Amino acid sequence: MNQNLPDEHRKNWDVLSVFQYLYQQQSISMLFILIIMWVILSLLSPYFFTVNNLFEITLQSAVIALIAAGESFVIFSGGIDLSVGSVFAFSAIVGGLALQFSGSVIVSLMASIGAGLFAGFCNGLAIIKLKIPPFVATLGMMGIARGLALILCNGVPIYGLPREYLWIGQGRIAGIVPVPTIIVIILFTIMYFILRNTRFGRFTYSIGSNPEATRLSGIKVSSVTLGIFMICGMFAAIAAVIESARLGTMQPASGNGYELLAIGSVFIGGASIYGGEGNIFASLIGALLVTTIRNGLNILGVSAFYQYVVNGLIIIFAVAADQIRRKH
């Protein structure tokens, strides 16, 4: 198209095309913003760009990133899951009680993940059988899971985790790379493969684009939807295991507000609020961005109250950017 233009105009056109392409690829533009933010925070605080702080960011990002991974499946399919923060706490407490009862780390891990899968199963069942909108169904599960977490342990946190369990959150491979970081890389790679190369992944995007057309194509939308919400619950449980192992305790009040951070991470990564598009690795960038902002505000001594405001603004900004991108 630009072959007949003068060289100067063609050069300008090419530069404009590059900027337009980057603008359309929100994940790439957010990666640039993340890098710029790291540079600015490094100038504001000499502590920010230290090895310890960068590892701390990856550790903090691991929990939010894993919840965002599950949330990505739901949002790509056109839904939303508000219960992940409460399912996070519920899974942790179930795993803690299983650990106290059996003394086995394996049993505890299976109990936590089973609790997450069960919560996701209940969410999916309410949506496909009772025809309850995802927003309302998961809002109900938010209260149920939080209440069960408090009831099961009488509101008392669980301490005394064995060394093997703590290694999941505090261990380092070769004494350098945190174990949670390795877990995040492996799981995101697997989920990326599933979304791009399996029928389940393609059906997830298809449901988000047009659920009725997907159903008329002979695809069992209800089964896929059930699987999507179970994956979301499972990732909330895995994130709970990592945070419990990192902090050395299982708290019934943990995960409060994590749904906001996870949903924000997915939208920052360029996922559409209407479903049908998105990239799970972009959600990982979104989680890094959210965590970097929180970390930077902490280092700069900004009150935690303002962090809620910033998180809310981030979500509004991300969704507004998606709306503007669609108009162009």
Image (cartoon, rainbow, N blue to C red):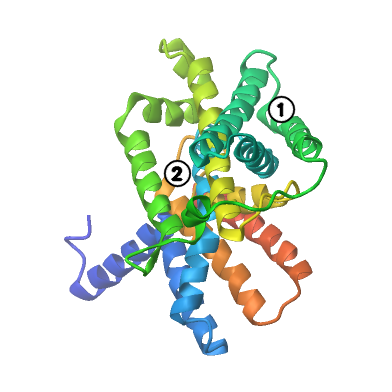
| Closer-to-camera residue (82/161) | 161
**Image check: 25 left or right of 244?**
left
User: Could you say whether the residue bearing mark 1 is in a helix, strand or loop?
Assistant: helix
Q: Which mark is residue 137?
A: 1
- Quadrant of residue 200 within the rendered picture: top left
The type of residue carrying mark 2 is: Gly
- Which of labels 1 and 2 is toward the front? 1
| Closer-to-camera residue (230/323) | 230
| For residue 271, above or below residue 12 | above
Looking at the image, which residue is at 47% across and 73% down?
54
Q: Which mark is residue 220?
A: none
| Closer-to-camera residue (241/59) | 241
User: Could you say whether the residue bearing mark 2 is in a helix, strand or loop?
Assistant: loop
Task: Find residue 29 and report its horizontal and vertical position in percent.
Answer: 43, 63
Looking at the image, which residue is at 37% across and 29% down?
202
**Image check: 5 left or right of 87?**
left
Between disc 1 and disc 2, whose residue precedes?
A: 1
